[in-house]
Image (cartoon, grey):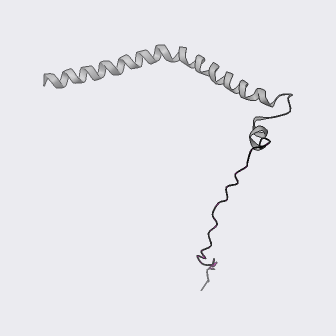
Amino acid sequence: MFEFLKTLLIILWIYYAIKLLMRWLFPRILPWMMKQIFKKAIGSNQSFGPQGSSVFESFSKPESGAKTNKRSTPKSKKVVGEYIDFEEIDE
């Protein structure tokens, strides 16, 4: 019985320790995380500036001398059946 109470107290202690720690850390970590996300967003949007080229265009156009590998999706040659539209008949 003593081991059960000891385990229960350890679990409760860990729960409240994490709760208090997060109450103290979360308000300090959240602004830092938002600054990092904002910096990444600003950095990725700078490529759309007055240079005239975007990230999408640089990836969509192959470089000169680069071979383009066109991947074709395999087409199904197997005929499964035809679509039949059934209508309800009022009696």
Q: Residue at x 62, y 69 (%)?
A: 76
Q: Quadrant of residue 78?
A: bottom right
| Image location (x, y in percent) of residue 59 | 74, 40
Q: Quadrant of residue 19?
A: top left
Residue 61 drawn above or below residue 12 = below
Q: How many marks?
A: 0
Residue 87 drawn above or below residue 17 = below
| Image location (x, y in percent) of residue 41 | 69, 27
Nearest the viewer among 65 and 78 is 65
Nearest the viewer among 60 and 20 is 60
Residue ranking furthest to the left: 1
Q: Residue at x 70, y 51 (%)?
A: 69
Q: Is residue 79 magenta?
A: yes
Residue 36 drawn above or below residue 71 = above
Residue 60 drawn above or below residue 90 = above
Residue ranking furthest to the bottom: 91
Magenta region: which residues?
65-87
> Which quadrant holds the C terminus?
bottom right
| Image location (x, y in percent) of residue 53 | 82, 34
The answer to whether 16 appears left or right of 51 in the picture is left
Nearest the viewer among 19 and 89 is 19
The answer to whether 11 appears left or right of 50 in the picture is left
Q: Is residue 44 magenta?
A: no
Q: Quadrant of residue 51?
A: top right
Q: Residue at x 36, y 18 (%)?
A: 16
> Which quadrant holds the N terminus?
top left
Residue ranking furthest to the front: 65
The secondary structure making up most of the magenta span is loop
Q: Residue at x 77, y 38 (%)?
A: 58
| Image location (x, y in percent) of residue 54 | 79, 35
